[in-house]
Amino acid sequence: MQQLEIEFKNLLTKEEFERIKGLFSFQPADFKLQENTYFDTEDFALKKMGCALRIRGKEGKWEWTLKEPAAGGLLETTEKLTPDAAAQIAGQGRFPDGQLAGRLKELGIEPARLRPFGKLKTWRAEKNYNNGLLVLDHSVYLNKEDFELEYETGDPVSGERDFQQLLERCRIPRRKTENKIMRFYKEWIKRNEES
């Protein structure tokens, strides 16, 4: 499956995160754990192209997703995985054939070159909001945690307006926010340079 991902995001302080939880009546049971394992080549060929590859496990279901830069957002190519296929990728680096593997090869990346380089856990809650999906995330990775608000929509113009109005309503400043994998990359590089 391929889709254009149009989303707006903003990092939050813990206090802002709690404020939004209360405003939208999120309950503890609304937050579901998802675990991402990120992959790249040893020389970070995907990152150099602005791409990202992850396997995500959530509620016993698995999928792998390639994100590529595209006009107006990110192009996501996602395929479902069986638990056995997910385990083979994680344990043996054996990636299944299919559209996603084919797309990697078109980008000049042989799946056999890919290596896992880290995990990120996110507790995520979602609610429909205006014409999109409001997402509240609490993520933990590399002994770091962050809080994030996302708004996924099909229309970049009304989505931008709705997201800005929401931030203003919640008294939250707009912050330049990179996606999770870029935040993960930066923290990973920083820690490896320090050691």
Image: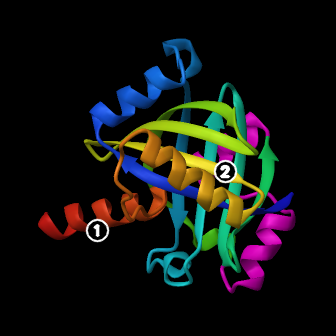
**Residue 43 shows up from this direction:** yes
Q: Front-most of 169 and 143?
A: 169
Q: Amino acid at mark 1?
A: Ile
Under circle 2, the secondary element is: strand
* Residue 59 percent coordinates (x, y): 67, 25
* Residue 74 percent coordinates (x, y): 67, 69
Labelled disc at residue 189: 1
- Neighbor class of circle 1 (other Cα within 10 Å; few <14, some 14-19, many 20+) is few
Write down the quadrant of residue 193 in the picture: bottom left
State the predominant SS element of the stretch in magenta: helix
- Please report the bounds of the magenta region as a residue range: 82-109
Left or right: 145 with respect to 45? left
Labelled disc at residue 152: 2
* Residue 97 percent coordinates (x, y): 84, 62
Residue occupying the far left of the picture = 194
Q: Residue at x 44, y 30 (%)?
A: 20
Determine whether label 1 and label 2 are within 8 Å by CB. no
- The image shows residue 10, relative to residue 30, as above or below, that is below
- The image shows residue 72, relative to residue 29, as above or below, that is below
- The image shows residue 170, relative to residue 118, as above or below, that is above
Q: Amino acid at mark 2?
A: Glu
Under circle 1, the secondary element is: helix
Is 34 one of the magenta-colored residues? no
**Residue 37 shows up from this direction:** no
Ranked by sequence position, the earlier of labels 1 and 2 is 2
Q: Residue at x 53, y 18 (%)?
A: 25
Q: Quadrant of the N terminus?
A: bottom right
- The image shows residue 105, relative to residue 15, as above or below, that is below
